[in-house]
Image: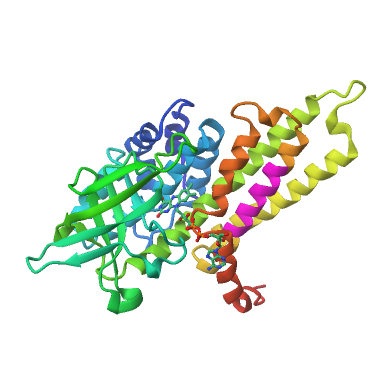
Amino acid sequence: MTDHRDDIDVIDSIQADDDAPTVWRKLGEGHVLRNLYPDGQRPLEPDIGLVDELVRTLDARLPLGVVMSVCVEAATALPLLLETARHSPVAAELGDAVARGQRLASVATTDVGLAGSALDAMNTSLTHEDDGGSVLRGAKEWITGALHASHIIVLTKDRPERGILGFSWSLVPVERDGMTRWPSTTSFPGSGLGDMSFDDVAIATDEIIGRRGRGLLDLALLVANERLVMSIWARALGRRVLVDTIEYLAGRSTGHAKLWDNPAIRARVAECVVDWRQLDALCRNEVVSPGDPRSRMVLKVAAAGTVRRIVGTCTDLRGAEPLRDGGLAELGAEAAMFGILGGTSGALLAGIADAATELLADRT
Ligand SMILES: Cc1cc2nc3c(=O)[nH]c(=O)nc-3n(C[C@H](O)[C@H](O)[C@H](O)COP(=O)(O)OP(=O)(O)OC[C@H]3O[C@@H](n4cnc5c(N)ncnc54)[C@H](O)[C@@H]3O)c2cc1C
């Protein structure tokens, strides 16, 4: 078991009014970002114990948008840069700055005008020119942290004839001519969610990072990381909401008793506790047998459902109180993203059905 005492001290320095770039800087300067991916492990898998320490504190102290920004970038941009650094000096330089907390980068895969799961049909393209340079054209949307980032790592289709092997990553500095970004929404304050367009953006050869043509394969690893981190965060959020709700119910007077004394209310909370324990067991299973992409799909769908049911039930049990500004009702609307980011539950269920026989195989 790794000793995370130094990391925990750094994480504990995060304050409730820190914005996402400040949180990232503190985590980078304190080496927590680097420690998330222990050296030598390939493919890069996050240290689950450290992720848990991190998300529990972030979730307890910060708005959901800020936590989302840190979690998504730690699960995607950071490992992508660390991994591609082996083949690309430009990625190595940026990856080092990102891991030290000096810069932020976002990963953009979702094309405008196309279902998020249909990446193979994407229109964002990289065209190779005779002079050796390349030109990026297209548009991406809902990119977490895009408004804070110094660079966007863009998934492009650059060789359509090569099918799944026709995709690459381009590293685009946000001030590059032809690149424009703007907020996606006023929801998720602090997340830096942005949409963007690329109008004939010039890309140098060394800005095409990673193994040429293997962008979709790299993405599969990132998405597995993202599903794990989001699920561990979902576990922390579900526990926090349940603990707060039990405390609320225990203090809510009905004149002669408290709401928590009512058996019907207790039974509804108990069902949520069972739900939470099932998610907890799935998360613990990732420590025992990490890295199976099929298990990550199951974990992510379970996490999204557990958060939805816990937040929904707790909102209901707390009457009008969740409707106050910043209350549980707002959290419930934003927490819908657990069923979207890293693959919608619908798309993942399609993958789980494909893998049903293997998932049901006896593993005792
Ligand atoms: C808060 C937030 C943050 C995000 N951050 C990022 C980011 O940092 N980078 C990035 O690239 N993208 C990001 N996204 C985009 C996200 O990845 C996509 O929204 C997601 O992939 C879903 O795509 P969609 O919205 O086009 O929905 P669609 O794919 O159009 O889905 C619509 C409905 O169809 C169902 N469905 C879709 N495909 C299937 C299928 N194969 N089988 C069964 N049902 C299916 C879905 O379950 C859903 O109910 C973010 C989105 C949100 C909301």
The picture places residue 185, in percent across and down from the top left corner, at 45, 40
At 63% from the left edge and 30% from the top edge, which residue is drawn?
Answer: 327
At 86% from the left edge and 27% from the top edge, which residue is drawn?
Answer: 258
Specify the farthest residue to the right.
256
At 45% from the left edge and 34% from the top edge, which residue is drawn?
Answer: 11
Q: Quadrant of residue 288?
A: bottom right
**Left or right position of 347 against 242:** left
Q: Quadrant of residue 171?
A: bottom left
Foreground residue, 243 or 31? Answer: 243
**Left or right position of 271 against 329:** right
Q: How many marks?
A: 0
Foreground residue, 38 or 179? Answer: 179
**Left or right position of 246 against 149:** right
The picture places residue 143, in percent across and down from the top left corner, at 39, 48
The picture places residue 15, in percent across and down from the top left corner, at 46, 26
Report the colour scheme. rainbow
- Magenta-highlighted stretch: main secondary structure? helix
| Span shown in magenta | 300-312
Q: Is residue 255 visible?
A: yes
